[in-house]
Amino acid sequence: MSKMGFFTHRYLFHFFLLTSAVFILSWLLVLRSAGRTYSIDYYKLLSIAKNNNLYANLQARASINEEAVILSRNSRKCDSSEHILKVFMYDLPSEFHFNLLGWKGRGRGVVWPDIRSEVPDYPGGLNLQHSIEYWLTLDLLNSEFTKNLGGRSAIRVHNSSEADVVFVPFFSSICYNRYSKLKPNQKRSINSLLQEKLVTFLTAQDEWKRSGGNDHIVMAHHPNSLLDARTKLWPAMFILSDFDDASDFDSRKTLLYFQGAIYRKDGGIIRQELYYMLKNEKDVHFAFGSVQKDGVKQASTGMRSSKFCLNIAGDTPSSNRLFDAIASHCVPVIISDEIELPYEDALDYSEFCVFVRTSDALKEKFLLNLVRNITKADWTRMWGRLKEVENFYKFQYPSQANDAVQMIWQAVSRKVPAVKLKIHRTGRFSGSITPIERRD
Ligand SMILES: *[C@@H]1O[C@H](CO)[C@@H](O)[C@H](O)[C@H]1NC(C)=O
Ligand SMILES: *[C@@H]1O[C@H](CO)[C@@H](O)[C@H](O)[C@H]1NC(C)=O
């Protein structure tokens, strides 16, 4: 499967343009509607865990967090221009990253591929689920070749004294997925060896000693990745996957959700008819109206509390709503006779979508019977699959303004004031102290 091959499809290009546009729009709306939001709950892609609690009690932690928020408010006030996160990335040997993808270095001492001419592919299929490290690394490498900083949330800097955070480019998820098994003559797996090497490398770096690791970003997106090293690197910020989508079958009270424009070309008639068919069903949300002000958040909340989300023909491009449904883990019900779906060469949509012919959808009670007849077990299986495939839609290279990669950098940026505060406090009496010495 060739990643670049994906992007040559014209429909995909359009799909990305449109999803980017929707993201810009939706983020503007979310930001405006919530004043200054510090959380990214619309985009529940990841959680960034900051281990503050190991040598501070709960109370101290709460106070640190409060001040962090105050600090970031102030800094927003004085500096209204967009802040670009400055990231120092270690030149870790390629065995920690692109070699794991099968890339062979080009000569001694060459750590990174020249991404202007070659972008090594990430293995497809389920691996993509935990591929954040790859896209973030590519984005940092790419930041050196782009002059236009518009839409960029992070850039790579080579002087670590000028950096806000330190990025550890270890592809831990693929390392776990591909290199955990012992080969016949091995005593230890590559996954285990690399983790040990990583800890040795990091703790010997000046950057690590200076901050006690607090300003380091370590990626452990696969829940089983980096298991040996996590506790040893605990002061760092971890980028983890967010698996706790608590809204399962029983907690999603709405059976079927649709919110959209009332009339669009071919889909108009179907919409009207469906509306009259469904409007009096009490577990169905069927409403017309475009998304305004709080609309994005509301629609996202609506989808997150629904079992099925309607995707009706004529919604050009259907992919917007489809994308939102997938991101909300709401099983899409696609009413269309010929819809073009992104990545259909790699994904079997029938595993996580329900397809209905237009002529069937317009039969009395057909749609409701169909979705009511889907058992909890079947729905839960599709829901699980949605959570697996959603990253197919989130990442792209090169990254664009406000896409998933930029969202992650922005989330990291919001942690920076708290991190700086913590580093300064830790160093009050002794200049530089590693947290381990402070523990007792
Ligand atoms: C790195 O940045 C610091 C702070 O701006 C500066 O004092 C130092 O000279 C820089 N180092 C190099 C090698 O440029
Ligand atoms: C759903 O189940 C009902 C009752 O068991 C049945 O009459 C109906 O034909 C089924 N509908 C579909 C679309 O499978």
Image (cartoon, helix red, strand yellow):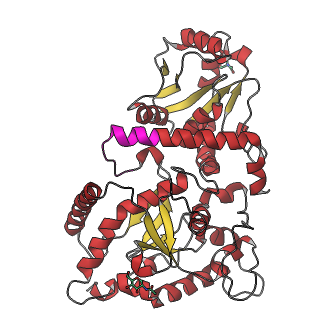
Q: Give percent across and percent down for residue 68.
A: 26, 63
Q: Residue at x 50, y 31 (%)?
A: 306
Residue 328 seen from this side: no
Quarter occupied by the C terminus: bottom left
Q: Give percent across and percent down for residue 346.
A: 76, 48
Quarter occupied by the N terminus: bottom right
Q: Give percent across and percent down for residue 316.
A: 65, 27
- Answer above or below: position of 429 versus 237: below
In which quadrant of the rendered view does residue 349 lie? top right
- Answer above or below: position of 264 versus 100: above
Q: Give percent across and percent down for residue 268.
A: 62, 14
- Is 410 in the magenta? no
Left or right, 162 with respect to 172, comes to left
In depth, the one of 399 and 311 nearer the eye is 399
**Residue furthest toward the front?**
147
- Answer above or below: position of 66 versus 262: below
Determine the quadrant in which ligand 2 lies: top right
- Answer above or below: position of 20 versus 423: above
Left or right, 237 with respect to 219, comes to left
Residue 228 seen from this side: yes
Left or right, 89 with respect to 349, comes to left
The span shown in magenta is: 26-39
Q: Residue at x 42, y 41 (%)?
A: 28
